[in-house]
Amino acid sequence: MDTEAYFKAKVALSQFLEEHPNLREKQEMIEESLRKAGKGTENRLTVIRSLMMASLIELNEALKKFK
């Protein structure tokens, strides 16, 4: 892993969360889920897929309110 790129990404994430504090709880949930998944790529991708599907379902429910 490129340490400089990782550091820049962490700084960018921190700045983003400062600008959007309402997303901090969601980010903490993502980080916790990835921690529990371990270091295996397959497990982490499964977690990311599940989180994305949950977000899409949430978005779909929100959009239904506008119909």
Image: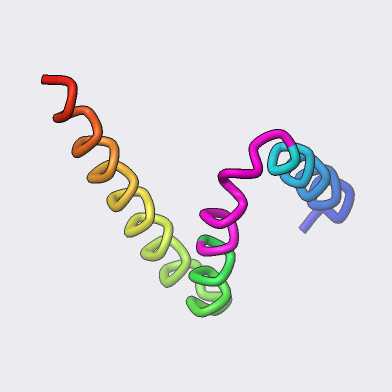
Q: Is residue 6 magenta?
A: no
Return the x and y of residue 3 as percentages of the image width and height.
Answer: 86, 55
Residue drawn at point x = 42 percent, y = 57 percent:
48
Query: Is residue 23 one of those drawn in magenta?
Result: yes
| Viewer-proximal residue among 28 and 50 | 28
Q: Could you tell whether 12 is left or right of 43 in the image?
A: right
In the depicted structure, whether residue 27 falls above or below residue 21: below
Q: Where on the picture, by quarter, is residue 27?
A: bottom right
Q: How is the image coloured?
A: rainbow
Q: In the rendered image, which quarter contains the N terminus?
A: bottom right
**Main secondary structure along the magenta-highlighted residues:** helix
Q: What residue occupies the far left of the structure in this picture?
A: 67
Q: Residue at x 17, y 28 (%)?
A: 65
Q: Position of residue 25 (x, y in %)?
A: 56, 57
Residue 9 image offset from top left, x and y in percent: 76, 45
**In the image shown, does 65 or 13 lie closer to the viewer?**
65
In the image, residue 24 lies at what x, y percent?
62, 52
Q: Is residue 46 above or below residue 54?
A: below
Q: Magenta region: which residues?
A: 19-29
Q: Quadrant of residue 64?
A: top left
Q: Nearer the viewer, residue 47 or 56?
A: 56
Q: Nearer the viewer, residue 22 or 6?
A: 22
Q: Is residue 28 left or right of residue 15?
A: left
Left or right: 45, with 17 as reference point: left
Indicate the quadrant where residue 42 lies. Answer: bottom left
Residue at image point 42% right, 72% down: 43
State the residue lying farthest toward the top: 67
**Above-or-below relation of 67 to 55:** above
Quadrant (top left, top right, bottom left, bottom right) of the C terminus: top left
